[in-house]
Amino acid sequence: MTEPTPSSMQRYLTDTVREIPPSGIRKFFDLVSASKDIISLGVGEPDFITPWHVREASIYGLEQGKTTYTPNSGLPELREEIAAYMHKSFHVRYEPSNEVMVTIGGSEAIDLALRALISPGDEVLVPEPSYISYSPIATLSGGKAVGIETFAKDQFKLQADQLKQHITPRSKVLILCYPSNPTGGTMTYDDWLPIAKLVEENDLIVISDEIYAELTYSSKHVSFASMPGMRDRTILVSGFSKSFAMTGWRLGYACGHADLISAMLKIHQYTVMCAPVMGQIAAIEALRNGMDEKDRMVESYNQRRRLVVKGFREIGLDCHEPQGAFYAFPSIQSTGLSSEEFAQRLLQEGRVAVVPGHAFGNGGEGFVRCSYATSVAHLNEALDRIGNFVNKFVKTPI
């Protein structure tokens, strides 16, 4: 029998997988990892280390021999802490026993939700620019992702009229991500009201990715699940990566109506079984005793946010003021370059890594995403390098 050649193995892949593009974020991350003199504003990861007492709790658990499987939905103590946290911080009540489940990061929760909800041909509404995984996961679930463009003039808030224009009889799920990755946009109670009305009128289910809920600067986050009538229509997804600097622990969770969580749990049982017990122990400690460190991190991000927005404006790049997350999304249209060209050339000539806006879908072209979750020294140096690069194309106002 003739062995297939490596180049021929592509023919065994599904059309769906072949057609999904690789991550635009990871592409630039891989380029950065190969060089030591590049300043990266590309990957959305806190530069803080997980607080010691959180790490210590996990270490102590290991010393006690806590290395076994947990219940599929997560440790009961962790689910109780998550439910208490959601009620205290965001005014949404969940029953820990059957309305909360622990996942491998928020990403798994989104994947589970879409696989539980989507039948072939169902449409998934995605306000864009947005986190790059939503549309590919919708496609992998058999659905059709429908992008809804948001605009800098609206602070990248989802507008009800834009949503209404994209709803069809096939629309089933609306994915929300506020505070937004990549724009830093947020939504208020009044912003949510007309969205909630459309969701109810059109019998939609909402997946609300609120991973950046603790990272807001001028007003407290309003959970979509807390809006009148939206609690049972919403699968609320969050996790510990951003708020508690726990990206590598891969701990997330989903909260929602028992019927929806039960369906997601069924898939979870057959795929990953449970989240690692060591991370769950650490997450319990983070929720019980990690709020002070979280607040200090948020204040540091706030200082950097002001620095970065001011810096971009001074070098001639228009930049709306992000109200959440830890990203700036400056316009680079004045350079005459596409987002991809700008990012590639800035990396090669300026030695700064940013993510081209088109990677985030409709409305992202003409912008780049810059994470300010890095040191002030790095940010200042990056702004100097970007300024020198931009001066080739744009004259800084006198």
Image (spheres, rainbow, N blue to C red):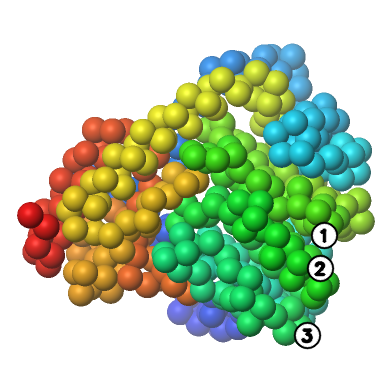
Left or right: residue 147 compared with residue 61: left
- Cα distance in 3D space between marks 1 and 2: 8 Å
Residue type, numbered disc 2:
Glu
Residue appearing at x 24%, y 53% in the figure: 313
Q: Position of residue 1 (x, y in %)?
A: 61, 83
Residue drawn 52% across the image and 33% down it:
245
Determine which quarter of the picture holds residue 392. bottom left
How far is the residue under mark 3 from the one under mark 1? 18 Å
Where on the picture, by quarter, is residue 119? bottom right
Give the side of residue 317 with respect to residue 277, left or right.
left
Whether residue 354 can be seen here: yes
**Residue found at x 87% / y 45%:** 99
Disc 3: which residue: 169
Question: Which is more toward the observer, 298 or 347?
Answer: 298
Q: Which mark is residue 233?
A: 1
**Disc 2 residue crowd, few under 14, some 14–19, many 20+, Cα 10 Å:** few
Contact? badges 1 and 2 (CB < 8 Å): yes
- Numbered circle sitting on residue 350: none
Q: Residue at x 45, y 68 (%)?
A: 151
Question: Judging from the image, what secondary structure is the residue with disc 3 in?
Answer: loop
- Of discs 1 and 2, which sits in the foreground? 2
Residue 291 is situated, as x and y percent measured from the top left of the image, at 60, 23
Label annotation for residue 200? 2
The answer to whether residue 136 shows anywhere in this view is no
Q: Say which amino acid is labelled 3.
A: Pro
Q: Position of residue 367 (x, y in %)?
A: 34, 65
Q: Residues within 10 Å of mark 3 (few under 14, many from 20)?
A: few
